[in-house]
Image: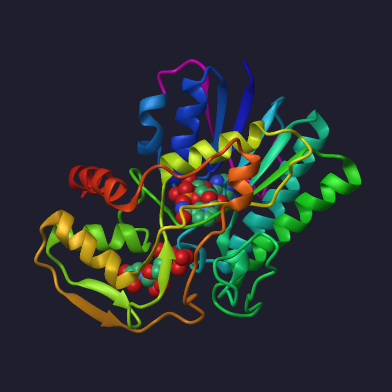
Amino acid sequence: MKRILVTGGAGFIGSHLCERLLNEGNEVICMDNYFTGSKANILHLLGNPFFELVRHDVTEPYFAEVDEIYNLACPASPPHYQHNPIKTIKTSVMGAINMLGLAKRVNAKILQASTSEVYGDPEIHPQPESYWGNVNPIGPRSCYDEGKRCAESLFINYHKQNNVRIKIIRIFNTYGTRMNPYDGRVVSNFIVQALKGEDITIYGNGKQSRSFQYVDDLVEGMIRMMNAEDSFIGPVNIGNPGEFTMIELAEKILELTKSKSKLIFQELPQDDPLQRQPDITLAKKQLNGWVPKVQLEEGLKKTIEYFKKVV
Ligand code: NAD
Ligand code: UDP
């Protein structure tokens, strides 16, 4: 039995990861400050004696004897990470320093939940891990993008300087059950609007694209990465290459919810990336043939059923 720390464990992705790790017979410590996560996400795990919940802010040092650390603590939705940008930077940078320090001290393996945002508004399409990205360092998204880029640098340097066993994954847009219905991301916004019969808010002309991955595929990729041989440290893209424009996404959600909501067009946020698609060649090769299995329609159906219950 391994003892595993999941920071940001009460969030959307973290709660699925905690559940899966417990089901595989591990002991799990879930650390969260509940900024964007919620106890409701992990309520069903509280009766498990091998699950421990800790209210803690990752910007403060934390000590526990653990074998593995998944570092997920960080708001992921643009309205939330831009709400207090300095705090977002502190969470990524000081959080990484604190967790890497812990990993060094107890000789734990540590995985960083990095992001496709390190590629910024990409000029290369699809994005391989070798692409260095196109990020505006002073734009409204920089608190998140540069925070995550600095965290990658910290990870690589703790590895080189202190031999910490690290793993970096770059997660592309992920959706699924337990997303906060009001956190402002596109999949949750569109489903909630469609279910309530409200207008669907398309930012810009809706021709910008994203590639959407269902959360179960991500969790599988994360665990395979943690368990891969120590010499494979990444960064590795984990995402579903299925690419859609925001108009296509809205139309698919209208069809699946049988909603009569109308599309309305609003201003495109500054520095909103025009396109995004993962090149997953490396993940397939290094993670035992990992490929995303849940395609958009199937994943959306599950997510819509969930939102019908919570909205
Ligand atoms: P989320 O907002 O649901 O989860 C983040 C969790 O971290 C929340 O529970 C939140 O309360 C917690 N948290 C935030 N700041 C904290 C702090 N200072 N101390 C302790 N806990 C803190 O978002 P998510 O989609 O589950 O994202 C999880 C991780 O995956 C994040 O690091 C995010 O950057 C990364 N990621 C997500 C996506 C995606 O599409 N969902 C894409 C790329 C990367
Ligand atoms: N978006 C949109 N309407 C919304 C929310 C988002 O058109 O109500 C667009 C947004 O401008 C972006 C895409 O959807 O182009 C994905 O946005 P999200 O915030 O989910 O993720 P990110 O931009 O970080 O990839």
Where residue 19 sits: x, y (%)? 45, 29
In the figure, is residue 83 to the left or right of 223?
left
Where residue 97 sits: x, y (%)? 75, 49
Q: From the viewer's perspective, is residue 87 above or below residue 300? A: below
Q: From the viewer's perspective, is residue 132 above or below residue 228? A: below
Q: Quadrant of residue 93?
A: bottom right
Which of the two residues, 22 or 9, is positioned nearer the viewer here?
Answer: 22
Residue 276 visible somewhere in the drawing: yes
Residue at 64%, 76% (x, y): give it.
134
In the figure, is residue 2 to the left or right of 215?
right
Q: Quadrant of residue 28?
A: top right
- The span picked out in magenta is 46-62
- Assign the magenta stretch its main secondary structure: loop
Where residue 78 sits: x, y (%)? 46, 66
Query: How many numbered discs sit on the rendered protein?
Result: 0
Which of the two residues, 93 or 224, is positioned nearer the viewer here?
Answer: 224
Q: Quadrant of ligand 2?
A: bottom left
> Which quadrant, please, contains the N terminus?
top right
Question: Does the magenta portion include 233?
Answer: no
Residue 57 visible somewhere in the drawing: no
In the figure, is residue 202 to the left or right of 197?
right
Q: From the viewer's perspective, is residue 264 above or below residue 65? A: below
In the figure, is residue 216 to the left or right of 256?
right
